[in-house]
Image (tube, rainbow, N blue to C red):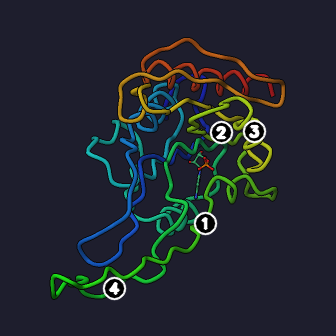
Amino acid sequence: QQNGPLAGKSVLVTAGPTHEPLDPVRYLANRSSGKQGYAVAAALADLGASVTLVSGPTTLRAPAGVTYVPCETACQMLACVKAAVPFDAAVCTAAVADWRPEVLAGQKIKKISRDDVPAPIRLVSNPDILAEISTPGSQRPALVVGFAAETEKVEEHATAKRQRKGCDWIVANDVSAGTGIMGGDSNQVVLITAQGSERWPHMLKEEVAQRLASRMADWFTES
Ligand code: C5P
């Protein structure tokens, strides 16, 4: 049994991108590295939480002491989350693909001749894992935290997102080109709660994670 302010609390962390296959060798993906989510998982474990890290494909090593559940697609990520509930808290950092190809070709899609016209790729919606976790019900974690990567009007969009998704807090960041945040080592975030918004200084992703984990510990102590 761990010691620390989150001892006895179970926390789900989703992290990384998802890969949405087109055929056995091709997929749609995004530039998420998983660094922020893995740092959150490590920080929560350091405070004594029992952490389950459900992660899409990354090049990172799972932090020591967490239960690591690898997955590939958004649908698999949701299935892994559902298989592991309930949790006291959830932090969804994963950059889940919003859409997936409607058809997964059984064999590699071939270009036979030079003038073959590429077939259009039809997309269908993926489940929204954060919104599903946030749905009121007996299985809902007491505290649900989402992340929001925005490229403009960060606070405004993230505040609307908190309400739309039904989560309790949103950690919002500006990932517009030139910030170097996506894939980088540091982050500049705004924490949005029902009480309002709070801009944190520019800091390492590990420091954002530690500050978030300790805020979560305070929340459990106070509630
Ligand atoms: O809507 P948007 O993708 O910007 O929302 C970001 C938040 O929602 C993140 O916390 C992300 O992990 C979560 N999300 C999710 N499932 C999706 C899309 C987003 O859990 N399909």
Which residue shows up at 59% across the image and 70% down it?
125
Three-letter residue code for mark 3: Asp
Picture coordinates of residue 158, whole percent (x, y):
70, 36
Decide: is 180 above or below 113. Answer: above
Secondary structure under badge 2? Answer: strand
- Per the image, the residue denoted by label 2 is 145
Q: Residues within 10 Å of mark 3 (few under 14, many from 20)?
A: some
Residue labelled 1 has its Cβ within 8 Å of some atom of ligand 1: yes
Q: Nearer the viewer, residue 66 or 149?
A: 149
Instruction: Using residue 192 as the reference point, say whether residue 183 is left or right of it.
Output: left
Residue 205 in picture, x, y percent from top left: 44, 24
Question: What residue occupies the far front of the structure in this picture?
Answer: 115
Front residue of 209/116: it is 116
Residue assigned mark 4: 105
Tell whether circle 2 marks a residue whose Cβ is less than 8 angstroms from ligand 1: yes
Q: CA distance from mark 1 to mark 3?
A: 19 Å
Residue 168: image tag: 3
The mark that comes first in sequence, 3 or 4, is 4
